[in-house]
Amino acid sequence: MIIIFSCVTFSFLSAQSIPPANDNIPVHILDSVTVVFLLKQGIAAHLASVDNTYVFDGKKTIAFYLKQGNANFAQNEARMAFAQIPGINVWEMDGAGTQVNIGSRGTDPHRSIEMNMRQNGYVTNSDIFGYPENHYTPPMQGIAEVQYVRGSAALQFGSQFGGMMNYIMKRGDSTKPLTIMSEQTGGSYNFFNSYNEVGGTKGKWNYYAYYDNRRGNGWRPNAAFSYHACYANVEYRLDDKGALSFQFSRMDYTQQIAGGLDDAQFNQNARQSLRSRNYFNPEINIPAILLKYNLSAKTKLQVISHGLFGQRNSVQFINTPNIPDTVNASLGTYNPRQVDRDYYNAFTTEARLLHFYKLGKIMSTITGGARYSTEITRRRQKGVGTTASNFDLSLTKPYGIDLHLRSNNYAVFAENIFQLTPEFSITPGFRYEVIRSVLNGAINNTSFPVSYKGNRNFPLFGAGLQYNINAYSQFYGNICQAYRPYLYANITPADQIGVIDPNLKDSKGYDIDFGYRGRFKTILYYDVNFFSLFYGNKIGQLTMAKPDHSTYLLTTNIGNSRATGFESYFNLSLWQLFSGRSGIFDARIFSSLAYTHARYLSGELNNNGKNMSLKNNRVENTPDWIDRTGFQLTYKGFSSTCQYSYVGKSFSDANNTVFSSTGVVGVVPAYHVWDVALGWHFLKYYDITGGINNIANAKYFTRRINMYPGPGILPADGKSFYISLGLKL
């Protein structure tokens, strides 16, 4: 902390010598050229105040390129890839990289369920208002830029608490008609990844496509996986004012699930697996059409329509780790497994318009738009499967849950940057959301018919402030309301040990940010902010006791919670600081540090006749401290990163249960992990990358869970290595 605030103070004092602009032209800190320059150097930057049809003035934003030599991109290793986002809590379940689990400020990281996940501006969550887990995960080798907007994203992107993350995919080379790139990666535990892409520009056409195939045995037994992903983008320039793009994305994988462990089993041997018959298989297809057009020098239009079609399949022997999956003596075979299947069909159109106009003598900016989506999910769960050991979704008895879920969403929004002076701006905004939900079907083999209709109409308001001290630094602040309806997933338990409160309520709250960011020459880049997130009627899980003293997990509105703290990022060139020179060599240190004090403000439960207050309990799955610090060296075509990660302890339930015999709930201890990544570009066309993850072979886990892919403790991977050879023509 001392280093961070010293750097910020030094930068602030140095900036005072630069006179502010005294004309009537508003000064924005980073134009698009500066942003791109920083990103290509592997340095995180904040998004420009205006980007296409979006406004980010006064908001807490982060953007960065996935740069060679910074992380293990072949395995989608999120711990290093997202290291420069302060406060990101990464759940690590395996080394396959088949899904990304991230959250922040006390939100649930499970498959990024409380994040608005996007690709090229369109949503990739499977069912945003019913089952918003993000099953779609593209290979990081195909991603050019990652953009993240904190809780203030609720107005422009949706009512989520966790913010918006957008993957900007690569485009074809604008200077060549054809480029080809191929990268082959091998690593520990029979890991192999083949990533291949093609792209270019011919006349008014730009095109880009990739295909990725990844497979391996996994660090634990019974953890083999096979992953496939493809993406294609064809863009046609209509004229100098705009372009029309056609895109298609697909991802599918089949993964064997090693299952969870209890504490004794984890301490005895974290690599062991007690499940050999569990499998998971999602298939997601996303077609999209994007229109971007400048109606005039002051007015921009963007229309994006996309669909999401796919399914999520699993077959598992679901029981706590202390119950072995062995041959049933009375049957003479293994016990039947549980089969769960979801089918997704969604269509969304978002239209946005941005306009520059003069307010007095100073230019201001307004953006507005509308969103329509319809999402249909067929949920079929608790089917009785076979006694086999392979991936087999066939049934021997019908599904215990068979539901049809439909959501229609209509939304309008607007935000306006009022540039009151050349240095100071205020950006108020609103969003009006309409959600129509219908659920019907049956639970427990049609003996209990289900019918539910929910109509929600609500406004969200927010405002941002930004003060430009000079062309290199600024203060920013934002407050924004957030809203989260309770989900289909919350009212249909998918496991054997879960119970749902029938009186669930929607969650409402707000997010506040205030910070200072900027740079000092090319030596130091920094961003320090304080935040407060209020989460009303937070839905979570409580550990409850039955009269026979056995336990179960109750999903309910636990109470109100608040997460307060700070997030800081700096990237400092030690070479430039001490030598006073910049050039082909650089040595930099970065740190993203976050402190989150997340506690329940209210909440009470009656557990087996005993009243218990949850006030001042820690919010589940929220460590107080997250720190990722790295040292980077670059010289001509060589780059390397050595990174240290520390994540503090957390609890897996709102009771703050310390220990349970099944391992499903309890403390998640603090852990320390070291990683090294290297990259070398040579002979014009060739690249070698490689590294070692968890170089000290730390024994740790990041989560406990009562459902897929557990139940129990899910150990993180031990030490592993990888090496890649790439060719680009």
Image (cartoon, rainbow, N blue to C red):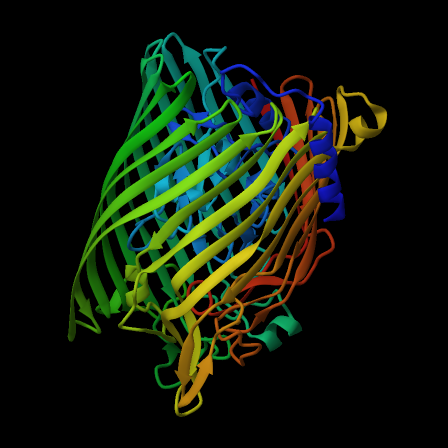
Q: Position of residue 77 (x, y in %)?
A: 57, 45
Q: Count every numbered label the image shows and give the total.
A: 0
Q: Is residue 292 above or below residue 676?
A: above
Q: Residue furthest front?
A: 360
Residue 56 sits in quarter: top left
Taking 47 as reference, is 296 left or right? Answer: left
Q: Residue at x 60, y 38 (%)?
A: 516
Q: Position of residue 510 (x, y in %)?
A: 41, 52
Residue 306 sits in quarter: top left
Q: Is residue 66 above or below residue 514?
A: above
Q: Position of residue 15 (x, y in %)?
A: 69, 27
Residue 361 sits in quarter: top left
Taking 267 as reference, is 494 left or right? Answer: left
Q: Is residue 426 above or below residue 625?
A: above
Q: Residue at x 50, y 10 (%)?
A: 175
Taking 675 as reference, is 348 left or right? Answer: left
Of residues 33 and 171, the one nearer the viewer is 33
Q: Residue at x 54, y 44 (%)?
A: 514
